[in-house]
Image (cartoon, rainbow, N blue to C red):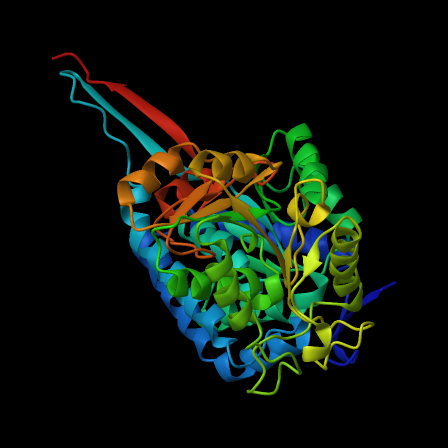
């Protein structure tokens, strides 16, 4: 197959079709990237920041086209589609602001007769493999800091969101990026694997499945490449009895069902202190029933289809398995007529009577379904929250800040939230533990992943 088609989950139509990058085109891109990067590494940081600023403005200028395009590509309703571009802008501008301090030389304490410092230098050519579920946010996390640090970038975007990769390319072009500095290539899996073995790229940033991360991470390791791997999640939340239940329900419904639950850091399991389980559950289900499932191009829609019929079927199977094992669904799919039972349109679901035997409480769901369990106390909540092979984020809902910090120290997760969830603060490191990945993006630490240290130990000439 020499072309790749982007099929819309909205109606099965073809959104776009792109030719696969040929091996000759890939070779030319690698040669151009190496040449451009050598010059870019010597370019003052201020000029790199200016390029990023122009790139952001060029992308924002396409907002009216991008929002409906996202709806057609992956089903996110136009009513909320602009939020991703706001996050894109926040992260890009924050990383540009942090760059001078993050990339400045590290200066040890003075020592008479010596000049000593550590420089942060670019790695070379960075390969970014980006997913479809938050196609602008996941890509910008790596693309912008890599460019700011003096690297060239090759972006391989997911098939479902290839138009996003083209938007990145067009915005870089309109921003005046040097020829060869940034490439968006339509690559096959085999080409990506050969690229990692070629010695022509110097770092991998991958966001996707655990299985994909293991495969690409192993290939990168064989070539002694660094790799940032952001993988799966089965993120938990705990509601303590002192919390405002209306507030907690509102936040957790959004955290579980935004983007139809298709987020690595979506809330997928909720533990509620048994003192408030029933009143919390009532509020939670009431809010879920307010969603409007339908065509994401309709501004009245608040819950769009999943990315594909196959993705929806996988979630249906998890729900059916849980029910067969004793779980009780609280939402009747008939309340959401767009869910015909055989399409990408899937009604939201809330399950009780669940336990950790069930895949719905163990394995990534990546869809609009969540299980809720009552717990006796903080210790039981912590045990269950940590009972997972994943560890991306964990959310606590309580008025007790000190207790939340104590509990957070005992949670196995890369980010601990208090009274919020499903958010990336670009001034904090985004990272995971266990099967949720390795490495970090964003914050000052993100720049450390995209540079190498070089030490200078200079002995002054004796007088």
Residue sitting at x 51%, y 84%: 64
322 up-or-down from 15: above or below: above
Q: Residue furthest top?
A: 462
Residue sitting at x 53%, y 64%: 136
Question: Along the line of sight, which residue is nearer the eye, 196 or 39?
Answer: 196
Q: Residue 158 sits in which quadrant?
A: bottom right
Q: Is residue 198 visible?
A: no
Question: Along the line of sight, which residue is nearer the eye, 119 or 296?
Answer: 296
**Which corner quadrant holds the N terminus?**
bottom right
Q: Is residue 273 visible?
A: yes
**Which corner quadrant holds the C terminus?**
top left
Left of 360 or right of it: where is 432?
Answer: left
Question: Along the line of sight, which residue is nearer the eye, 232 or 34?
Answer: 232
170 up-or-down from 155: above or below: below
Q: How far across and how far down the image is residue 365, in percent?
A: 67, 54
Q: How far across and how far down the image is residue 313, in percent?
A: 79, 62
Q: How far across and how far down the image is residue 429, in percent?
A: 41, 44
Q: Residue furthest right?
A: 1
Residue sitting at x 41%, y 60%: 248
Q: How far across and how far down the image is residue 275, in percent?
A: 44, 50
151 up-or-down from 110: above or below: below
Number of disc labels = 0
Left of 1 or right of it: where is 374?
Answer: left
Question: Along the line of sight, which residue is nearer the eye, 204 or 368?
Answer: 368
């Amino acid at each position: 197959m020499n072309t790749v088609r982007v099929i819309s989950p909205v109606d099965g139509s073809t959104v776009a079709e792109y030719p696969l990058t040929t091996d000759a085109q890939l070779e030319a891109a690698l040669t151009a990237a190496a040449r451009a990067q050598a010059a870019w590494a010597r370019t003052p940081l201020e000029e790199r920041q200016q390029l990023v600023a122009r790139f952001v403005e060029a992308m924002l200028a396409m907002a009216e086209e991008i929002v409906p395009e996202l709806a057609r590509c992956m089903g996110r309703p136009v009513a909320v589609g602009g939020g991703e571009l706001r996050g894109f802008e926040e992260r890009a501008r924050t990383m540009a602001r942090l760059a001078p301090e993050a990339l400045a030389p590290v200066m040890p304490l003075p020592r008479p007769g010596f000049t000593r410092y550590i420089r942060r230098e670019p790695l070379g050519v960075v390969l970014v493999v980006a997913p479809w579920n938050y196609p602008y946010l996941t890509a910008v996390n790596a693309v912008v800091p890599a460019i700011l640090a003096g690297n060239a970038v090759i972006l391989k975007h997911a098939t479902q969101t290839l138009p996003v990769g083209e938007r990145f390319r067009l915005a870089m072009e309109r921003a005046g990026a040097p020829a060869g500095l940034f490439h968006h290539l339509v690559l096959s899996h085999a080409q990506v694997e050969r690229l990692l073995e070629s010695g022509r790229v110097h770092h991998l940033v991958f966001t996707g499945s655990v299985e994909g991360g293991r495969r690409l991470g192993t290939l990168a390791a064989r070539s002694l490449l660094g790799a940032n791997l952001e993988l799966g999640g089965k993120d938990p939340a705990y509601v303590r009895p002192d919390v405002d239940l209306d507030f907690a329900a509102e936040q957790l419904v959004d955290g579980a069902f935004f983007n139809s639950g298709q987020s690595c850091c979506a809330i997928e399991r909720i533990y509620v202190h048994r003192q408030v389980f029933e009143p919390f559950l009532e509020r939670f289900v009431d809010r879920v029933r307010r969603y409007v499932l339908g065509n994401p191009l309709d501004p009245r829609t608040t819950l769009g289809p999943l990315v594909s019929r196959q993705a929806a079927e996988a979630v249906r199977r998890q729900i059916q398995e849980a029910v067969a094992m004793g779980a009780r669904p609280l939402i009747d799919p008939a309340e959401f007529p767009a869910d015909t039972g055989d399409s990408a349109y899937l009604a939201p679901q809330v399950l009780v009577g669940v336990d950790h035997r069930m895949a719905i409480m163990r394995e990534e769901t990546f869809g609009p379904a969540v299980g809720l369990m009552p717990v006796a106390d903080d210790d039981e909540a912590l045990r269950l929250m940590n009972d997972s092979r994943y560890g991306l984020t964990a959310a606590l809902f309580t008025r007790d800040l000190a207790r939340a910090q104590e509990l957070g120290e005992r949670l196995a997760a890369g980010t601990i939230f208090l009274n919020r969830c499903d958010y990336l603060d670009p001034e904090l490191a985004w990272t995971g533990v266990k099967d949720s990945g390795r490495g970090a993006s964003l914050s000052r630490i993100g720049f450390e992943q995209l540079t190498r240290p070089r030490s200078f130990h200079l002995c002054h000439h004796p007088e």
